Amino acid sequence: MNTKVKIRVLIVDDEPELRMLLSHVLENAGYEIKEASDGEEAINLLKKEKFDLTLLDIQMPIANGIKVLKYIKEHTLPTKAIMLTGYADLKHAMEAKEFGARDFIGKPYKMDDVLSTIDRVLKE
């Protein structure tokens, strides 16, 4: 009987194909996955459930990744955050670091890079 607790990851991205791809790869790697299609949905999930890691797209409608990051920091949640971005935007990167983002993964991403970044951040 496997009593090992799975690491819980929340994937927040407004692009359904990317969410599904990340979910599939991370579930195969042994993570327990939940998805949110925007920042507001992510904040609602964070209010109810605990996650070890959040993968956050920076640019999303309704509430962006920075807003979710601020929520995590303000409520001192134990969730570590990695930002997903198609915008190599220094301003957002600096802002995200300020609010506790552990790392960034640029889109389009290589799944090996995603997995190694997650592994490294979780060990911090």
Image: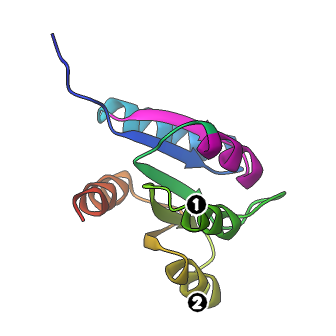
Q: Can see residue 32?
A: yes
Foreground of the two, 25 or 101: 101
Count of numbered marks: 2
Give the position of the N terminus as an image quadrant: top left
Identify the secondary structure beneath mark 1: loop
Q: What residue is pinned by disc 2? A: 90
- Judge from the rendering whether residue 122 lies leftward or rightward of residue 70; answer left or right: left
Q: Which quadrant holds residue 41?
A: top right
Query: Which residue in the rendered view is the most extreme toward the top?
Result: 1
- Single out the mark in the foreground, 1 or 2: 1
- What's the residue at 66%, 70% (across, down)? 66
Q: Which residues are magenta?
A: 31-47
- What's the residue at 58%, 89% (across, down)? 90
Please state which amino acid type lies under the numbered disc 1.
Answer: His
Q: Which quadrant holds residue 79?
A: bottom left
Report x, y in % for residue 32: 41, 32
- Judge from the rendering whether residue 30 lies leftward or rightward of residue 43; answer left or right: left
Mark 1 Cα-neighbour bin, 10 Å: few <14, some 14–19, many ≥20? few
Q: What residue is pinned by disc 1? A: 75
